[in-house]
Amino acid sequence: MSRAGFPALKSLEGYEYSAIRFPPSLSREELLNCQFVGEKKNLILFGPVGIGKTHLAIALGAKACAIGMNVRFYTVTELVLKLGEAHRSGRLERLVRDLVQLDLLILDEWGYVPIDKEGSQLLFRVVADSYERKSLILTTNLEFSKWGGIFTDEQMAAAMIDRLIHHGHLLIFEGQSYRMTHALMRQTATPAS
């Protein structure tokens, strides 16, 4: 599990699913059993900031590790930087081969930061090479219609979306930011005298 690169360990135990709209093609039980990974299907976790997308992605990744799957977690920015460095140093083929051999690749914060042309092309290669070979989990708060602005190329964005959703499930998260709600609760709590 340490090789997965999780920023923190998260668990499925006690996770609140009421804010998630599941597609008809995926049950909660199938999700929790990581059945989508065995089927090489993708998950796109879409919704506002602070609502538990990253928590769920990490918890599912930890579960996949626990049942013997090879998993790696990156923020999109981190992966794009790593791909660029590998490209410049002649190690890109090795890195892409290592990524393709995973069972599950988790890409957090998809679309939070614009990506330059080279980064977009390298990230597209990872998505294209993963198609029907492994599962991806993406967390994003960006609607598909806005992906072209992040990846500098509308056609490349459309091709990425096509590959991601063809064998994928879109989970829509709704509600208020967990972090914001809990921060406000702490501020309004009055100390006992």
Image: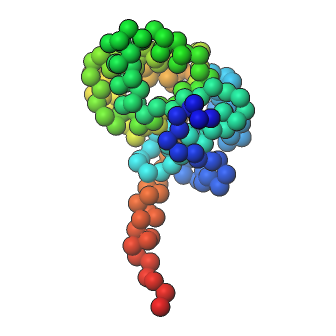
From the top left corner, tell me how far across and down residue 15 is, in percent: 61, 52
Is residue 88 visible to us here?
A: yes
Is residue 156 visible to us here?
A: no
Nearest the camera: 161 or 60? 60
Q: Residue at x 57, y 45 (%)?
A: 9
Nearest the camera: 12 or 156? 12
Q: Quadrant of residue 91?
A: top left
Q: Quadrant of residue 81?
A: top left
Q: Residue at x 45, y 36 (%)?
A: 108
Q: Is residue 7 left or right of residue 79?
A: right
From the top left corner, tell me how far across and down residue 28 is, in percent: 67, 42
**How was the colour assigned to the protein in this rendering?**
rainbow
Residue with the most extreme bottom position: 193
Q: Is residue 111 left or right of residue 11?
A: left
Q: Residue at x 43, y 71 (%)?
A: 186
Relative to 47, residue 25 above or below? above
Relative to 95, residue 175 above or below? below
From the top left corner, tell me how far across and down residue 41 is, in percent: 60, 24
Q: Quadrant of the N terminus?
A: top right
* Total marks placed: 0
Nearest the camera: 94 or 36? 94
Q: Residue at x 32, y 31 (%)?
A: 146
